[in-house]
């Protein structure tokens, strides 16, 4: 069949359009592959940074504990003042190691989808006092005063004591790290519309504008030393945010450079339908398992 000049031109135009469309799709696929490859490269780099920093946070306290224990074992009899100093240092390093490991394990639970809330009746004043005491040595090292204020209307609150403890620990640790020497930290806990409201305020370095959208990113590293997440590897605050989300809560912050940062956490009352596992002021123990009492 003989094609007319018009038919030939139309066929060539159709094939040109098809080839042009195929070329456009090929370019889009190549661009997408480049984007995915870049993202994977960045992800691997960030994870490597994360692992490197986590390794330091675990190895350093452990090495200190081993070194202090060795020195303690070789002290001469009767040198009790040095024994007391070394015992306090060992306790501080052991607490730091335990604190970091809890964050790592909790992050793993969250990733595995195994971090469902386990509710109990929590003694709020007791847990606040305990956390304040836990960070006493770390705060004293920078001559920082931790001021706690538990409103009179709150004694007990229904929540997950383990998650609440980690949330408070991370916020206090972050506040101490980025406070100036001889400063103070305000920790206030109240009830607002039956919900638990927690505010942690430091008067230190503040969060740089470049980092404010990144502080809850688990793998992000920052270009400045201003209020990067806990211990500098982005794990503490990311775990805090994830735990608050699991409790259907909310976290926000206000910050100003060289004037400090205020974190505000709202944890809702889960309601009467939630099963209670017991009564506690300590994430490591339940005093009894009698939900009908409440």
Image (cartoon, grey):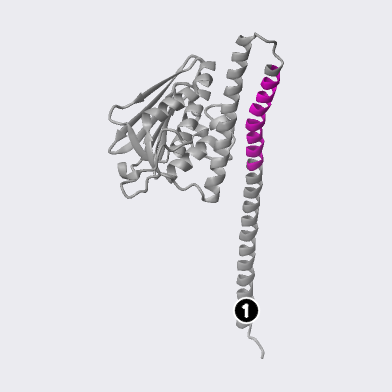
Q: Is residue 25 visible?
A: yes
| Between 288 and 51, the one nearer to me in the picture | 288
Q: Quadrant of the N terminus?
A: bottom right
- Out of 91 and 64, give the one closest to the viewer: 91
Q: Which stretch is magenta?
A: 47-71
Residue that appears at 49% across and 20% down: 136
Q: Does the magenta stretch include residue 268?
A: no
Asked if 196 appears above or below 85 in the picture, the reply is below
Q: Which residue is drawn at 34% across and 44% down?
A: 291
Residue 171, given in percent of the width and then of the height, sits at 47, 30
Residue nearest the viewer, comparing 293 with 90: 293
Report the label total: 1
The answer to whether residue 178 is seen in the rendering is no
**In magenta segment, residue 63:** yes
Q: In this view, does 30 lie above or below 147?
A: below
| Residue under pointer 1 | 11
Residue 131 to residue 184: above or below: below
Identify the secondary structure beneath mark 1: helix
Residue 172 position in % (x across, y down): 47, 27
Q: Where is residue 2 in the image (x, y as percent from the top left)?
A: 67, 89
Residue at 70%, 10% (x, y): give it: 76
**Would you say the magenta stretch is mainly helix, strand or loop?**
helix
- Quarter of the image for residue 108 reads top right
Identify which residue is drawn at 51% across, 39% down.
238
């Amino acid at each position: 069949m003989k094609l007319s000049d018009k038919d030939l031109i139309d066929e060539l135009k159709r094939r040109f359009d098809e080839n042009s469309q195929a070329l456009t799709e090929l370019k889009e696929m190549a661009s997408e592959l480049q984007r995915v490859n870049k993202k994977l490269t960045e992800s691997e780099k960030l994870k490597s940074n994360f692992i490197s920093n986590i390794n330091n946070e675990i190895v350093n306290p452990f090495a200190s504990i081993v070194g202090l224990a060795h020195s303690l074992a070789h002290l001469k009899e009767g040198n009790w003042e040095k024994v007391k100093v070394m015992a306090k240092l060992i306790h501080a390093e052991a607490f730091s190691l335990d604190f970091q490991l809890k964050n790592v394990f909790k992050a793993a639970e969250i990733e595995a989808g195994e971090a469902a809330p386990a509710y109990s009746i929590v003694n709020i004043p007791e847990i606040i006092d305990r956390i304040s005491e836990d960070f006493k040595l770390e705060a004293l090292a920078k001559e920082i005063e931790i001021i706690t204020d538990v409103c009179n209307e709150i004694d007990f609150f229904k929540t997950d004591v383990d998650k609440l403890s980690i949330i408070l620990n991370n916020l206090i640790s972050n506040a101490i790290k980025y406070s100036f020497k001889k400063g103070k930290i305000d920790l206030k806990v109240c009830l607002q519309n039956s919900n638990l409201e927690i505010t942690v305020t430091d008067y230190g370095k503040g969060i740089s504008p470049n980092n404010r959208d990144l502080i809850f990113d688990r793998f992000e590293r920052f270009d400045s030393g201003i209020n990067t997440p806990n211990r500098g590897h982005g794990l503490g605050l990311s775990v805090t945010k994830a735990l608050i989300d699991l409790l259907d809560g909310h976290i926000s912050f206000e910050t100003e450079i060289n004037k400090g940062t205020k974190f505000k956490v709202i944890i809702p009352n889960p309601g009467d339908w939630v099963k209670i596992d017991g009564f506690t002021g300590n994430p490591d123990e339940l005093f009894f398992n009698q939900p009908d009492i409440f």
